[in-house]
Amino acid sequence: MQKRKRLRLKEYDYSLSGSYFITICSIDKSNIFCSIDEDIINDNYDDIDFSKYIKYTKIGMIVRDNIKYLNSEFDSILIDNYVIMPNHIHLIINLIESNKTSLQKLIMSFKRSITIKCKRKIWQRSFYDRIIRNKKEFDKINEYIIYNPFKWKLDEYYNIG
């Protein structure tokens, strides 16, 4: 049996305050969250109305609502930005103060809540994270999230199905 690659930093305390860039993929990277109209690529990046180009599925709407719920219900968590793509989501999660729960437990609870509401398995095992170390890195990741739908066809997770 092949041993799983460790995704987290071994000695880092993921309950500490700070900003984290999170990517969570759908099971088998299936396009279950939304579709992105290809005309988005031809539009101007400035002041775009994404609602014209991104059509959420029922599952995608549940994911969006749960992200908004996290942001409004927990004083120690701030979702600085997020994007829901056809088969994955990106979030910048800011833990405002040291938490009783770790980032891993927060994400697992988030995924479990959505799975229960969808009544089916929708998530790939685990998730990817990056500790955001400074404002320059934060700004670069934030820009990546904002423009990710424009670059869907170039995305490493892109698939037609």
Image: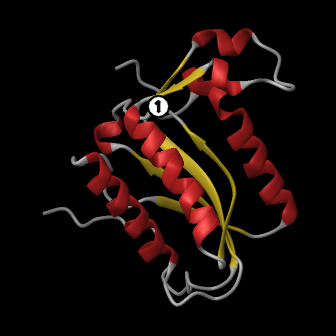
Closest to the observer, 40 or 78: 78
Closest to the observer, 68 or 132: 68
**Left or right: residue 27 compared with residue 151:** left
Q: Where is residue 66 in the image (x, y as percent from the top left)?
A: 49, 55
Q: Which residue does the numbered mark 1 point to in the structure image?
A: 86
Name which residue lies at 65% across and 9% down.
39
Residue 96: name its quadrant.
Answer: bottom right
Name which residue lies at 56% across and 84% down.
15
Q: Is residue 57 above or below residue 142?
A: above
Q: Position of residue 136 (x, y in %)?
A: 86, 58
**Left or right: residue 8 compared with residue 52:** left
Q: Quadrant of the C terminus?
A: top left
Name which residue lies at 29% across and 65% down.
4
> Is residue 19 in view from this perspective?
yes
Residue 46: name its quadrant.
Answer: top right
Q: In this view, does 74 lie above or below 152?
A: below
Q: Is residue 88 above or below residue 39?
A: below
> Is residue 130 in view from this perspective?
no
Q: Where is residue 116 in the image (x, y as percent from the top left)?
A: 27, 56
Mark 1 crowd level (few <14, some 14–19, many ≥20, 10 Å Cα):
many
Figure colour scheme: secondary structure
Name which residue lies at 63% across and 63% down.
71
Three-letter residue code for mark 1: Pro
Q: Where is residue 115 in the image (x, y as percent from the top left)?
A: 30, 53
Residue 45: name its quadrant.
Answer: top right
